[in-house]
Amino acid sequence: MRIAHVALWTADLDASAAFWARHFGAEVGDAYVSRNRPGFRSRFARLEGGTSIELMTGPWVEDAPIDARERAGWVHVAISLGSEAAVDELARRLATEEALISPPRRTGDGYYEAVAKTPEGALVEIVA
């Protein structure tokens, strides 16, 4: 078994697509426009290795309030970059865009990771 893809609601489909392409080298597909759900559009961001993130939007999507960040449900996605040097480099780039939440560190459970936020505020762990 493997995860086919994960999905992320976003208020700005183009900004989200650009974030995944710029920082993670994602190949972003063309927009899909639903005929069945007016206003729904999505794009798949495919990462090296086969993982895909479905970026979805519609006029009903709003930014989540800050106090809703810690609640039951998915918390973050972790992207493995393969080396500590790659984590350090991406963390530096993310910091210049004020998208870095937590700088690189060794966690208590042995990961070397940094934490970033997407344009919509979703958390992404970048790990070695």
Image (tube, grey):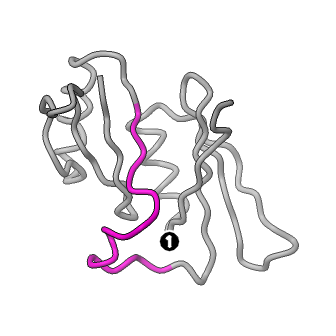
Residue located 61% across and 82% down the image? 59
Position of residue 107 measured from the top left corner of the image (x, y, whole percent): 16, 33
Quadrant assignment for the C terminus:
top left
Indicate whether 9 appears above or below 86.
below
Name the residue carrying label 1. 11
Q: Nearer the viewer, residue 3 or 53?
A: 3
Based on the displayed image, in which of its 4 quarters is residue 58 positioned?
bottom right
Image side of residue 94 versus residue 61, left or right:
left
What span is colored magenta in the figure? 62-79
Image side of residue 108 versus residue 121, left or right:
left
Magenta stretch: includes residue 66? yes
Q: How many callouts does the rendering have?
A: 1
Q: Nearer the viewer, residue 39 or 105?
A: 105
Q: Is the stretch drawn in magenta largely helix, strand or loop?
A: loop
Q: Nearer the viewer, residue 37 or 73?
A: 73
Label 1 CA crowd tier, 10 Å (few <14, some 14–19, many 20+): some
Residue located 80% across and 76% down the image? 37
Residue located 21% across and 17% down the image? 85
Position of residue 35 measured from the top left corner of the image (x, y, whole percent): 87, 71
Magenta stretch: includes residue 64? yes
Quadrant assignment for the N terminus:
top right
Indicate whether 71 appears above or below 124.
below
Image side of residue 25 versus residue 108, left or right:
right
Indicate whether 58 appears above or below 16.
below
Based on the displayed image, in which of its 4 quarters is residue 127 positioned?
top left
The secondary structure type at the circle numbered 1 is loop
